[in-house]
Image: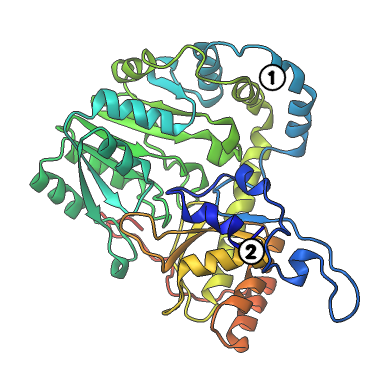
């Protein structure tokens, strides 16, 4: 198989290929594989073991579900696969019991993308405003159904900060009927505090709809209660979207939910298929109430890893690491380094899968998104970057030392007090 077998998948799809697609290709299929990757005999005469791929692309929680949860699902695999799940109302009712929500204000979907699709078909009539770069379905879905998408560009020289007053001014000038924000935003992890989002909802109370995509909100540690889902349940034109797969580390199950006032939630819920949730989703929803402590521990571990990984990457010469409250970091590569070439080399030679952001509207191939991973995985990434980036050994050695010691290296961006109406 040619070296382009793996990278060909990356060059032919608008979205990153699934882990399953990559897994069907052997890690040793690439002719460019390094000795560590291929298991070839080294100059010392011994064969190194083949390394498994490590995923820095798909934004999963690496600490949840727990091994015990996976063992329980394994033990129930036959019945999960063999029998129909309960209807969506039953699963939704259980989820609402766990989360303390009113079932009348909730609609569960087969992934947040299903809900985005129905929101577009049912509730977006003419136009939609969205800051970019962001999650691609918020631009692609309404464009596919002939809506006007008013794109508000976030500026790199402002650290991709969303200026809310300017965004509202933009919406008024364009006459947008629907407005969307992702909080935290993907791919940069920029975060709006709760009081800022509430200000925006008040300012836009006359629009047809305001959507707050909180798919990554559980990873926020900047404040204790960041979500505005409680407000969505009582406001006339607000929907909050959640993606359980991301924070629970279960993208493959495909489940998410929205919160809105009962009339809005019912309008979406009534259009969803009766069995749109699968038995895996049902088994997890009925299990999570037993693992609340472990779940919150997983979020604390991830926040620790995010801080350490950010410090280590910021110590790499000429890398710019943007402040994030998601479970990923947006990184600007040094001048002259193309993200496509780096992504391909990291995958084929080092078995490291990253997200190059050139196909995101408002971004370019000089940016990559790196999912937060545990210490050993990040060390492997740093070693690969040391080989791939045109940087001197002194600076990269400093990055290794910073990561190993947990030193407080100051990168390009530092935490500061938040302006009253800006995103970070």
Q: Which residue is mark 1?
A: 81
Query: Can you name the residue that lies furthest to the front here?
Result: 1
In percent of width and height, residue 178 lies at: 21, 36
Of the pair 315 and 227, the residue shown nearer to us: 315
Q: Is residue 402 left or right of residue 142?
A: right
Query: Can you name the residue that lies furthest to the right here?
Result: 45
Of the pair 270 and 304, the residue shown nearer to us: 270
* Label 1: how many Cα within 10 Å (few below 14, some 14–19, many 20+): few
Mark 2, mark 1: which one is toward the viewer? 2
Total marks in image: 2
Q: Which residue is mark 2?
A: 348
Q: Is residue 132 visible?
A: yes
In percent of width and height, residue 238 lies at: 28, 30
Q: Quarter holding the C terminus? A: bottom left
Q: Is residue 128 above or below residue 338?
A: above
Q: How is the image coloured?
A: rainbow
Q: Is residue 231 visible?
A: no
Which labelled disc corresponds to residue 25?
Answer: none
In percent of width and height, residue 388 lies at: 59, 76
Q: Is residue 244 left or right of residue 118?
A: right
* Label 2: how many Cα within 10 Å (few below 14, some 14–19, many 20+): many
Q: Secondary structure at mark 2?
A: helix
């Amino acid at each position: 198989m040619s070296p382009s077998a793996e990278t060909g998948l990356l060059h032919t799809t608008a979205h990153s290929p699934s882990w399953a697609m990559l897994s069907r290709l052997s890690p040793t299929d690439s002719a460019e594989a390094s000795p560590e990757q291929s298991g070839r005999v080294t100059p010392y005469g011994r064969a190194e073991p083949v390394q498994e791929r490590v995923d820095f692309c798909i934004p999963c929680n690496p600490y949840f579900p727990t091994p015990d949860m996976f063992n329980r699902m394994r033990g129930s695999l036959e019945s999960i696969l063999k029998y129909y799940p309960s209807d969506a109302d039953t699963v939704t009712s259980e989820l609402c019991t766990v989360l303390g929500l009113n079932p009348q204000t909730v609609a569960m979907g087969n992934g947040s993308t299903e809900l985005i699709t129905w929101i577009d078909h049912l509730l977006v009539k003419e136009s939609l405003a969205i800051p970019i770069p962001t999650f691609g379905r918020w631009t692609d879905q309404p464009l596919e159904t002939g809506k006007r998408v008013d794109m508000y560009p976030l500026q790199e020289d402002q650290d991709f900060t969303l200026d809310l007053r300017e965004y509202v001014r933009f919406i008024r000038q364009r006459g947008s009927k629907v407005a969307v924000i992702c909080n935290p935003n993907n791919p940069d992890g920029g975060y709006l505090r709760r009081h800022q989002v509430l200000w925006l909802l008040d300012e836009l109370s006359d629009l047809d709809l305001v959507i707050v995509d909180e798919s990554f909100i559980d990873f926020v540690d900047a404040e204790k209660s960041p979500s505005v889902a409680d407000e969505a349940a009582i406001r006339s034109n607000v929907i909050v979207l959640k993606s359980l797969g991301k924070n629970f580390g279960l993208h493959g199950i495909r489940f998410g939910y929205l919160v809105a006032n009962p009339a809005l939630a019912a309008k979406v819920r009534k259009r969803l298929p009766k069995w749109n949730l699968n038995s895996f989703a049902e088994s997890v929803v009925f299990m999570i109430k037993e693992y609340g402590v472990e779940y919150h521990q997983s979020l604390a571990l991830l926040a620790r890893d995010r801080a350490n990984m950010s410090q280590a990457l910021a110590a790499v010469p000429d890398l710019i690491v943007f402040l994030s409250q998601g479970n990923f970091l947006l990184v600007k590569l040094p001048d002259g380094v193309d993200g496509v070439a780096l992504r391909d080399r990291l995958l084929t030679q080092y078995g490291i899968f990253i997200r190059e952001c050139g196909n995101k509207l408002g971004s370019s191939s000089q940016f990559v998104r790196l999912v937060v991973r545990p210490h050993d995985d990040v060390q492997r990434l740093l070693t690969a970057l040391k080989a791939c980036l045109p940087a001197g050994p002194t600076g990269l050695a400093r990055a290794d030392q910073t990561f190993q010691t947990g030193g407080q290296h100051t990168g390009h961006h530092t935490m500061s007090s938040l302006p009253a109406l800006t995103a970070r």
